């Protein structure tokens, strides 16, 4: 595993909730990242780790390889990849995301 993959793995496994996004929860830099943070906020997950991929090009590319998922944002809960903003929205609407966050 490369250095960036090790860094990502440590972040994913060391935090209950991690969102790899563009910008920060206070200042998202794209609509998809804004939607992801809004969903988490609506579910009461106000405390979560986030990584601004715009500030680290290695992580921006490395997270896509780590998850084998081509887009950002990417949500991880309890060390498991959940998905991007579209999957988060679908899971939010059907109640699956709330259940996963509580579990």
Image (cartoon, helix red, strand yellow):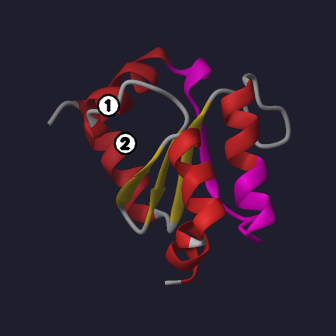
Which corner quadrant holds the N terminus? top left
On the picture, is 40 further left or further right than 86? right
Residue 66 or residue 2, whichever sits in front:
66
Identify which residue is drawn at 72% across, 55% down: 39
Q: Position of residue 28 (x, y in %)?
A: 77, 31
On the picture, is 2 further left or further right than 69? left
Q: Residues within 10 Å of mark 2 (few under 14, many from 20)?
A: some
Q: Position of residue 47 (x, y in %)?
A: 72, 65
Q: Secondary structure at mark 2?
A: helix
On the picture, is 53 further left or further right than 83? right
Asked if the residue at tag 2 contacts the one at tag 1, i.e. Cβ–Cβ closer than 8 Å, the answer is: yes
| Residue 96: numbered disc | none
Q: Position of residue 52 (x, y in %)?
A: 62, 31
Identify which residue is drawn at 45% across, 22% down: 60
**Residue 76 is covered by the magenta coloring:** no
Q: Residue furthest bottom?
A: 103
| Residue 4: numbered disc | 1
Q: Position of residue 97 (x, y in %)?
A: 56, 67
Q: Which residue is mark 2?
A: 8
Identify which residue is drawn at 70% across, 59% down: 40
**Residue 48 is covered by the magenta coloring:** yes
On the picture, is 69 further left or further right than 23? left
Q: Is residue 79 above or below residue 49?
A: below
Whole-number angstrom distance, CA of label 1 to CA of label 2: 6 Å
Q: Is residue 48 above or below residue 35?
A: below
Q: Residue furthest front?
A: 94
Q: Quadrant of residue 34?
A: top right
Q: Is residue 95 above or below residue 65?
A: below
Q: Residue furthest top?
A: 57
Q: Secondary structure at mark 1?
A: helix
Q: Which residues are magenta?
A: 38-56
Q: Residues within 10 Å of mark 1 (few under 14, many from 20)?
A: some
């Amino acid at each position: 595993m490369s250095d960036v993959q090790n860094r990502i793995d440590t972040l994913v496994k060391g935090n209950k909730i991690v969102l790899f996004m563009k910008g920060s929860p206070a200042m998202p830099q794209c609509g998809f990242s804004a939607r992801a943070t809004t969903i988490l906020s609506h579910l009461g997950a106000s405390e979560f780790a986030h990584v601004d991929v715009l500030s680290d090009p290695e992580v921006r590319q490395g997270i896509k390889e780590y998850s084998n998922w081509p887009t950002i944002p990417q949500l991880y809960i309890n060390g498991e990849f959940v998905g991007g903003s579209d999957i988060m929205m679908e899971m939010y609407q059907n109640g699956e995301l709330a259940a996963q966050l509580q579990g």
